[in-house]
Image (spheres, coloured by chain):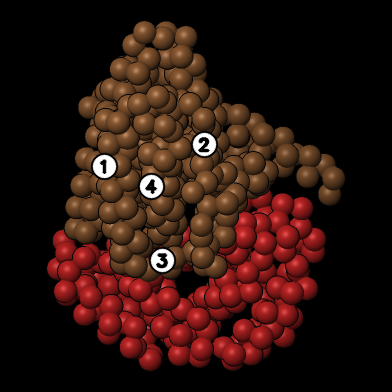
Chain colours: A red, B brown
Amino acid sequence: MAITVSPGTFDFVSFDAAYIERIAGIVAGQLGVTDIDFSVEIDETSALNRISTDASVTPVRIMVHSGAFEDKRRPRQQSEIDTTVSLARCMLRARDRLRGGFASAPTDTELTLAQAAAWDTYIMARLSRIDIPVNKQAWHYNWRNRHGFNDHSDAAFERMWQAESLDWDQLSSASDAARSVSA
Amino acid sequence: MRKFMPADELARDERFSQTTQRDRMADARTTVVLNGDQNRRSNNRLTPERNDASEAARALMHGIFVGEIQALEGAGRTCWDFTTGEEAPFALKLDMARQAWDEARHVEISCKLGDWMGAEIGQYVENTVLFEAACSNDPVLRLAGVNRALEGLAIDVFTTMKEFGEIAGDPYLEFCEDWMLADEVTHVKMGSDWLRKVTENDPERRKKALEFQNIVDKMFSYGGSRSESDESSLGIARRFRELAGFTDSEVDYVAEVSMQALNERKAQIAERQAAAAANK
C-alpha cells in the first residue's frame, strides 16, 4: 500500500504531512484497505469542512479542505480525531465503491443531498462499531435535515444505523422511501 | 465585586477555548470564491441546500450559545458597572436586568438546540469580540455597542436560523429562533430608546455613541460573514431591524459597511494567498 500526502508542508495551517500519512496508514489497517493506494490532497487555502473521494483512479484520490482536519477549538491546528474520522469516511466510501456493491453509485459530486446523507449514516455507523469516535446525534440531525423531521424518518435512520451490509440499490431505496413520507 | 471586567477574564470552565477577532482575521484561508475558483461554492448563505448545512448550522448554533453568554455578561455588567442615578438611570438598569434574564433563557435554549443538533459545549472556539464591545466605560456607548450593534447582529443571525429551520422542516429550531428573535427586537428597541433619552440634551455624546456603534457594526460583520451578498453566511434582516427602531438609512449603513468588510476581507485573503503561492 502507498499513501501520499500533499502538500508536504503547509503555509496556512499548522498541519503535519507525515502525521497525516501515519494516521491514514492506521485507518487503512482498521478498515482492511491496505491493498489500495491513496493520494491525500489537502486544500489548505480553504477553511471549509469538505471531503470527497475519487475511487475511479489509481491511486484513489482523497480530496480534503483544511477544515475537515482542523481542531475546531484551536483554529488552524490539526485535530487527530478529525483527521482520523475524515480519512476513515473517505476510505470507507472508496471501499464501498470498489468492492462493497456501490459500483453503480453516482460520483461524489453527483450524489443528491439525501443520498449523501444516507451513505454518510451507513459509513459513520460502521466506523462507530470499530471504536472511531462518532457523535451519533450529529449524524441523526444530518439525516433529519435531508429526510425529514418525523417518526418515520427517525425509524429509517435507526435501520440505516444498524445495517451491516447494504449495496447502493438498497441504500438509495431506503433513502427514497424515508423521503417520500416527508414529501 | 470587580467593575469593568476585561474580556480575557470572563469566567469559563475547562470545556471552553477562546480566540480574539484579531486571531480570527489573521486566518488567511477562505470559504468564498476567489478568482473564479469553481472548486469553492459561490453561495455561502446558510441554507439547508448547502452540502455542509448540518455542520455549518451546528457551528453557528454554538456561536449563538456563546454569544448569548457574552450578551448576558454585557447586560449584567451594565447593571453593576455604573452608579445608579449618577451614571445610569435606575429604569435603564431595570431594562438591562430584564435583558440579562432574557439572555440567560436564550443561553439555555441555545444549549438545548445544540444538543438537538449534535453539538457539544466547547466543541468550537469562542470569539470574545461580542463582550469586547460591551466594555465601554460610558453607559451610552455600551448601549450603542451591545443593544444596537450586538443585538442587531442577533436579529440577523436569528432570522437566518429561523429560515433555516423553516426550510429544513425542523419545528424546534424554527419555533425557538422565532421566540428569541422577538426578544432581540425588544432589546434593540430598548437600546434605541435609551440612547435617544439619555443623550437628549447632549448631541456630542449622541454623535460619539453612534460613531462607536458604526465601528462595532463593521467589526460584527466578521470580515463579510454578514452582508446582503450571497457570499456571506448571514443576511441582514431589514424588516426586523425596522421593527426594532432602526431607520432605513441606518440599515443601509449596516448593509454598506458589511459589504465593505466582505470586499476588504476578500482582497486581504487574495493578497495573502498570492503571496503564499509566490513563495512556493
The image shows residue B107 at horizontal and vertical percentages of 34, 55
| Between marks 3 and 1 in the image, the one whose residue lies nearer the viewer | 1
Using a 10 Å C-alpha cutoff, classify the residue at mark 4 as few (fewer than 14 neighbours), some (14 to 19) or many (20 or more).
many
Contact (Cβ within 8 Å) of mark 2 with mark 3: no
Q: Residue type at mark 3?
A: Ala
Task: Determine the residue positioned at 68% across, 43% down.
Answer: B26
The part of the image, by quadrant, that contains residue A3 is bottom right
Q: Is residue A5 placed above or below A103 in the rendered structure?
A: above
Q: Position of residue B53 (x, y in %)?
A: 39, 56
Q: Observer-nearest residue: A183 or B246?
A: B246
Residue carrying label 1 = B98
Q: Do circles 2 and 3 both sit on a common chain? A: yes
- Asked if residue A158 lies left or right of residue A46, the reply is left
Q: Earlier in the sequence, mark 1 or mark 2?
A: 1
Q: CA distance from mark 4 to mark 3?
A: 21 Å
* Residue at mark 4: chain: B
* Spot occupied by residue B153 in the image (x, y as percentages of width and height): 39, 36
Q: Is residue B45 visible?
A: no
Q: Earlier in the sequence, mark 4 or mark 2?
A: 4
